[in-house]
Image: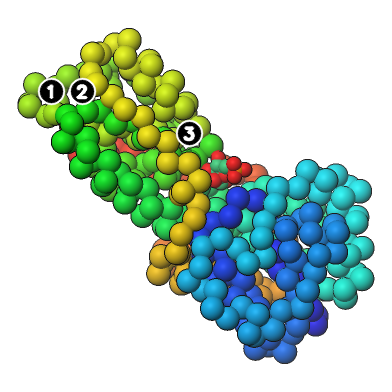
Amino acid sequence: MKKIGILTSGGDAPGMNAAIRAVVRKSIYNGLEAYGIYQGYSGLINGNIQQLELGSVGDIIHRGGTMLRSARCDEFKTKEGQQKGIEQLKKFGIDALVVIGGDGSFMGAKALTEQGFPCIGVPATIDNDISGTQFTIGFDTALNTVLNAIDRIRDTASSHERTFIIEVMGRDAGDIALWAGLAGGAETILVPEEKYEMESIVERLRSGQKRGKKHSIIVVAEGVMSATDFAQELKKSIDIESRVSVLGHIQRGGTPTGFDRVLASRLGARAVELLLEGKGGRTVGIEKDHIVDNDILSVLGQPRKFSKDIYDLSQILSI
Ligand code: F6P
């Protein structure tokens, strides 16, 4: 193996740049050439590929987003699209690929591996919704961005004695809502993994009012429903003054935290090691501070475990 390709795909996540840097530098350290594939799988299909040197990845470890840019590419879901990608890889003499992204990106890596082209998946998504790893790159940064917002909203919520309904990202997974809700002291957290009962939410708000509580914070993961819809539903059951705040894509940007930079560096470097060991079709991850790797099929085949213990704790601590 002489040449490794790297691409980032799907929703960007803070720390992707640190992962790119690790893959490039670890490759060059081991005498390999590294090639950046720009704009994810659509860049692969179009041959938007350039060699990266040590200096190409300088001054990026602290930057959010991805220097390779990203895209969601429907064409790559087809056999024809994948074939075009493989032709480009052959044209550039690239022997193996590191794919940095979420489960959609891993589907592409799986398809390429099945067609005889070794790929390693590096989990990067703010949603923290990939199995085979306790944390994905970008989750910690997004968590802290959301927390920062909740803390600020709390100031105005308490000044005006209002209930705030804060919508956070997470289409299928509630980790951002759960962790930020717990750390931000939210009274109610709504996640796609757990059913909610409006009656008990209202009861919680009422008992808070009785204790003299003037404001409250409700965090809703977008996968449950929009904060606006929830506010309308809530209004039918209790007469409180509420406001809605949708945090949106602000959660995807910003300087990666130290945790995300270290995680990205470790996972990116391990991906190169696996390829050097002749392994493809695997994903890397972290479990109990150990870097692990798993068959990409098993990772895609099983939904990530929801932290019920953290959810239950959040319920107890917000009484
Ligand atoms: O997958 C990450 C994510 O940020 C989700 O939480 C969110 O639902 C989605 O991407 C938004 O995607 P887009 O940037 O295409 O609007």
Dot 3 corresponds to which residue?
Answer: 222
**Where residue 282 sits: x, y (%)?**
67, 62
Q: Earlier in the sequence, mark 3 or mark 1?
A: 1
Q: Label 1's element?
A: helix
Q: Which percent across, then down, holds residue 78?
A: 85, 44
Q: Which residue is mark 2?
A: 205
Q: Is mark 3 within 8 Å of ligand 1?
A: yes
Q: Position of residue 281 (x, y in %)?
A: 72, 61
Amino acid type, label 1: Gln
Can residue 97 be seen here? The reply is: no
Q: Is residue 148 above or below residue 262?
A: above
In the displayed structure, 112 sits above or below 317; it is below
Q: Give the residue displayed 60% in from the left and 63% down from the top.
A: 66
**Snapshot quadrant of residue 311:** top left
Residue displayed at 81% across by 60% down: 44
Q: Is residue 47 left or right of residue 250?
A: right
**Is 237 on the left or on the right of 102, as rendered?**
left
Q: Secondary structure at mark 3?
A: loop
Badge 2 amino acid: Leu
Residue topped by disc 1: 209
Check the picture and name the quadrant holding the N terminus: bottom right
Residue 118 located left or right of residue 129: right
| CA–CA distance in space, label 1 to label 2 | 6 Å
CB-based contact (under 8 Å), mark 1 and mark 2: yes
Counting residues from the N terminus, which is met first, the one under dot 2 or under dot 3?
2
| Horizontal side of residue 2 vs 247, given as left or right | right
